[in-house]
Image: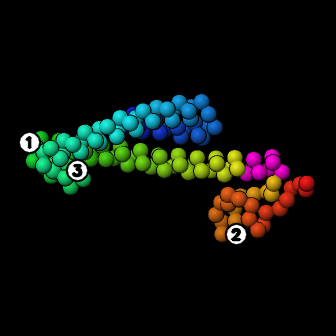
Amino acid sequence: MRDFVAVLQREQAGLTADDADEIAAASQSKAGLVRQLSQISTERHLALARAGFTTDRAGLDAFIARQAESTMLAQQLDRLLAVAGEADEINRINGKLIRMRMVHNQQSLGFLLGGESTPTYGRDGRAMLGGGPSGRRLTTA
């Protein structure tokens, strides 16, 4: 999971620096790690089910409580969940960066193709993806 956080941080750096090579490399690494994490999750679910526990958080907590080293396992789970929370937050920010880049690219394409100008923000303060009623023509055909 720490490797996944590191890859998300690389992706974020690439998005911030507009470094297509870094974004591509991070995306490739991220895809491999997602497959690994998915496999680990599947194995955890199977192990819990075989031991007679549900595969949700309650089942995991019940499984941990029955182990001799339950305190250590609970602490490890807490650390894992903290790292997962960090990954979730970085991924959320990366999604915002990607959406911002998409809006910018759509606006640039619209301008280059001679379409209506695309206002960045509407009257309600929200980013706009397409020309709205306030859009103005930059050129005429």
Q: Secondary structure at mark 2?
A: loop
Residue 102, percent across and down?
64, 48
Along the viewing direction, whichever of 62 and 46 lies nearer the viewer:
46
Judge left or right: residue 1 versus residue 97: left
Residue indicated by mark 2: 123
Q: Earlier in the sequence, mark 2 or mark 3?
A: 3
Magenta: main secondary structure equals helix
Local packing at callout 2 (Cα closer than 10 Å; few below 14, some 14-19, many 20+) is few
The image quadrant that residue 71 belongs to is top left
Residue 32, percent across and down?
42, 33
Q: Secondary structure at mark 3?
A: loop
Residue indicated by mark 1: 68
- Residues drawn in magenta: 107-114
Q: Secondary structure at mark 1?
A: loop
Q: Earlier in the sequence, mark 3 or mark 1?
A: 3
- Residue 32 against residue 137 in the figure, above or below: above
Residue at point 10% right, 44% down?
Answer: 67
Which callout, 3 or 1, points to the residue nearer the camera? 3
Judge left or right: residue 19 versus residue 39: right
The residues tagged by marks 2 and 3 sit, at their Cα atoms, a distance apart of 47 Å
Residue 2 can be seen in this image: no
Q: Are marks 1 and 2 in contact (CB under 8 Å)?
A: no
Q: Which mark is residue 55?
A: 3
Magenta-colored stretch includes residue 121: no
Residue 5, percent across and down?
42, 39
Residue at point 86% right, 56% down?
Answer: 138
The residues tagged by marks 1 and 2 sit, at their Cα atoms, a distance apart of 61 Å
Q: Which amino acid type corresponds to the residue marked 2 in the rendered image?
A: Arg
Q: How is the image coloured?
A: rainbow
Q: Which amino acid type corresponds to the residue marked 3 in the rendered image?
A: Thr
Q: Which amino acid type corresponds to the residue marked 1 in the rendered image?
A: Ala
